[in-house]
Each structure stands twice: as C-alpha cells, then as structure tokens.
Image: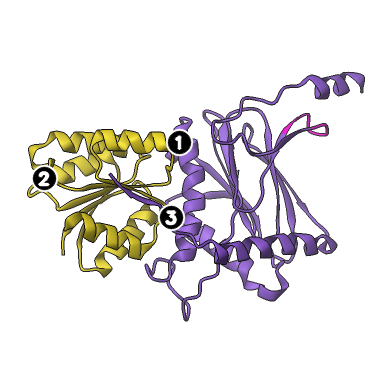
Amino acid sequence: MLSQFNRAATHDRPKVVPGFEAIGSNWDNRLGCWMAKILPGEFYITAADEGITTVLGSCISACIRDPAIRVGGMNHFMLPEDTTQGKSAWLDANAGLATRYGSFAMESLINGLLKLGARRERLEVKLFGGGHVLKAAIEVGDRNIEFARQWLRTEGFRVVAEDVGSDVPRRVVYMPSTGKVQVKHLRSTESGDIARREQQHLQSFAKQPVTSDIELF
Amino acid sequence: MARILAVDDSASMRQMVDLTLKSAGHVVVSAIDGVDGLKKASDGDPVDLVITDVNMPNMDGITLVRELRRLPQYRGVPLLVLTTEASAERKQEGRAAGATGWIVKPFDPERLLATVDKVLA
C-alpha cells in the first residue's frame, strides 16, 4: 500500500501532446495510471501509457488507436439539432449542420492521430454511448449512433467493438496503448445530471452556431 | 460556373464539398490526397480554383499549394485551404506556400460558396 501511495504522490503526468494541456488528468490509483477526463465537445489524444475517461448519456465517443505505434484517442460529441424540415439525407448540403459538426469531431480526432504518425489503414475503432437518456428527445442518442456508423462506413473504417444505445448512461475508460476498454453502465438515478449537462451542451450550439472562420490572404 | 479541384482524404468531406459546390452549378474534380491532386491539376486544362485539405497521406495540402505555385499555369489561380487546423502558425505556412485563403472546418456551405465567388471574381 505504501509503495502504491508513494507512486501516486511522486508520479509525474506523462508527456502531454501539444494542444491538449487544458484537459484535466488525475492519477488513478485503481488502474495505476494517469487518467485524462473529457467532457462533451472535447477530444484527447495520447502517445503515453495513460487512460482516457468520459461519461456518456446520449452523446457518443469514438475510441480510435493505431496499435502498431500505440497512439490513440477519444472524442465525445453529439450532433446539434437539425432544424431542417423532414428527414434529411445526411449529406444534404443544406441540412448538413449536424453532419458537418459530427464530421468535424471525427476528423479532428483522426487528424490528431495521423499527426503523431498513425496510419489511417491501421486505425482500430470502438464506439460507445448514444443512450436514450434525454427524456425530452429519446431519438437524440439514436441519431448520434446512426451518424457515427454511417460516417465510419463512408470513410472505410470497421468498428471492432461497440456498446451503444439502450436507456443507460455509461462511464467509459479507454487505454489507447492496449486498446482495452471498460464500460460501466450507470444507474438511471445518475441520468439526471448527465442529461442536464448534455442538454446544456445541446443548447450551447444554438447560442454559438457552428460556423467557419475564413481568412483571405 | 467554374471548374474546381477539391482535394481531401476524407470521403465524407469530399462528398460534402462536392455537393455544396455542385449546388451552385460548379463542376467538381475530386482528389484523395496531394499527389492525386497535383496529377489531376496538371492533366489537361488547369482548373479555375483549387480547394485543399491540409492533413493528408502521401502529400499534404501545404506542399500541394507550394507545388502548384511552381507550375506556370497555376501562378494566378486561387488556391483555398479547407482544414481543421486553425493555428496562426499553420495559416502562416499556408500563406507563405502561396495559398489564397484559409477556411477552418466545419464549413458553412453558404459562406464557402460566397468565398469561392469572391476569389473567382
């Protein structure tokens, strides 16, 4: 016990990939490694022997890694509401706010991995979340799952493991160096807080529309 | 109506850019990376505009811009970068390579089309 305590007290946080310094990380005594925690709209990438964790309601997380060079990461996103009338095709340019936002979340994670030397054809993808947690909008989770699956299919990625849907929130712990994932289904009593946080995140899209920053030189 | 070369390694991004440009009547030639883009740009008549991603295998978008600027027929052609990269350093690299403008993803279709019109005018 004492040695474990000493290790916790003296262990330095592994080298953080530039750009991810703002993501909080704590020593996890149970797993004996550092654990970065991400929130809705964030993603995290690491080349170190550390974990990444998040809590998902209707949001979705892709856990992606290159096993050959042991770099990997996780995102955590949900699609903004699509106000277009009717059931729009996901690639309809006029209905595509949700699509563009989701693609951005997926592409940011994958580009970050490629920059660390990962190869697209080696990437291993696991998918979690999309629970029916938001009472007001049961279909939000399904829409997130449907988007993620379709995006991955279009890009030619195969999902090697997933735990999505149903009416449970989840805590996901991902170890990019090994690819191991632990998913804990949380009790529905915990859904309230998670749903509230996701609802806030959903509303933040309305206040701050997703729009491109354009600069002409 | 212009002939536009759109370069991106992401299939879904190629589809989205393609649909957006075609909705405004443009003719789109797609390429999957910088090498493919350079080949398609230099085969036959030059395109009126190039829109390229940055992070791609084989040849990245900034290198593609630099290579295109070396070709006499591309000295005056607008070259736009469309990327998730938003840092001032990367933008400066793009500018130094000869890019005409920088658009950060996720892109807004109407603003992309407005920018295309602007640089083609």
Q: Residue beneath label 2, please?
A: B43
In the shown orientation, is residue B99 left or right of residue B2?
Answer: right
Residue A144 painted magenta: no
Q: Do labels 1 and 3 share a chain?
A: no
* Disc ID at residue A187: none
Whether residue A165 can be seen here: no
* Same-subunit check for callouts 2 and 3: yes
Where, by quadrant of the figure, is residue A80 drawn? bottom right
Instruction: Say few, some or many: other residues with alpha carbon within 10 Å of mark 1 (under 14 / 14 to 19 / 20 or more).
Output: some
Nearest to the eye among marks 1 and 3: give it. 3
Looking at the colours in the rendered structure, which chain would you say is drawn in yellow?
B
Q: Quadrant of the C terminus of chain A?
A: top left
Inter-mark Cα distance, 1 to 3: 19 Å
Query: Which comes sooner in the sequence, label 2 or label 3?
Result: 2
Alpha carbon distance from label 2 to label 1:
29 Å
> Which residue is denoted by mark 3 in the rendering?
B106
What's under tag 1, amino acid-wise?
A: Leu
Task: Name the spot of residue A186 as percent of width and height, x first.
Answer: 80, 56
Residue type, numbered disc 3: Pro
Q: Choose top left, top right, bottom left or bottom right for residue B35.
A: top left
Which residue is at 62% across, 25% downward? Answer: A15
Contact (Cβ within 8 Å) of mark 2 with mark 1: no
Q: Which amino acid does label 2 sit on?
A: Asp
Q: Residue A114 bears which disc, if any?
A: 1
Q: Residue A158 at x, y = what percent?
A: 50, 50
Q: Nearer the viewer, residue A156 or A207?
A: A207
